[in-house]
């Protein structure tokens, strides 16, 4: 059984260990295109390694070494590996941005 399953994530803390370059995603009709920035990242929880997605301003705010908390996010399995995001209705908070934080009590 995987550590994470497809579905909602109530609360999760992650120590960011790697971030990948952001990309621009365009959607909509040609005359009504909207752009969204997204970046893939990976981090550690008390249950192991996870991938996660950062959206728009999160791409600039989150740094390697930060401890972040995702509330009311989602998880989907991609090739059997968890991918986490705050999504449209969840939130992402930077709990420790001094880049030296230790991950404790991650999943409450």
Image (cartoon, rainbow, N blue to C red):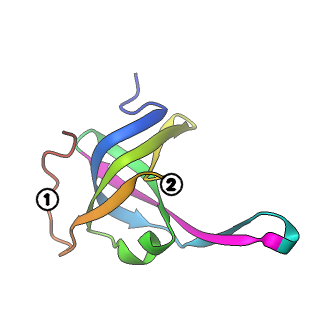
Q: Is residue 82 visible?
A: no
Q: Position of residue 19 (x, y in %)?
A: 43, 67
Q: In front: 31, or 38?
A: 31
Which circle, 1 or 2, is nearer the viewer? 2
Whether residue 60 sits left or right of residue 35 in the image: it is left
If the image is split into quadrants, where does the N terminus sit? top left
Residue at screen point 52% across, 34% down: 80
Label count reads 2
Residue at screen point 51% across, 71% down: 56
Could you say whether the residue bearing mark 1 is in a helix, strand or loop?
Answer: loop
Please give the residue where the numbered disc 2 appears in the rendered image.
88
Label 1, residues with CA under 10 Å away: few <14, some 14-19, many ≥20: few
Q: Principal SS element in the magenta part?
A: strand
Q: In front: 14, or 108?
A: 108
Please give the residue where the numbered disc 1 appears in the rendered image.
102
Residue numbers of the magenta segment: 32-45
Whether residue 34 sits left or right of residue 62 in the image: it is right
If the image is split into quadrants, where does the C terminus sit? top left
């Amino acid at each position: 059984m995987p550590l994470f399953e497809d579905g909602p994530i109530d609360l999760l803390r992650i120590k960011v260990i790697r971030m990948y370059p952001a990309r621009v995603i365009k959607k909509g009709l040609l005359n009504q295109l909207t752009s969204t920035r997204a970046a893939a990242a990976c981090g550690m929880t008390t249950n192991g390694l996870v991938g996660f997605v950062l959206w728009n301003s999160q791409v600039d705010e989150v740094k390697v070494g930060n401890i972040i908390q995702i509330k009311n996010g989602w998880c989907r399995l991609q090739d059997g590996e968890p991918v986490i995001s705050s999504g449209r209705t969840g939130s992402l908070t930077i709990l420790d941005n001094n880049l030296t934080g230790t991950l404790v009590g991650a999943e409450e």
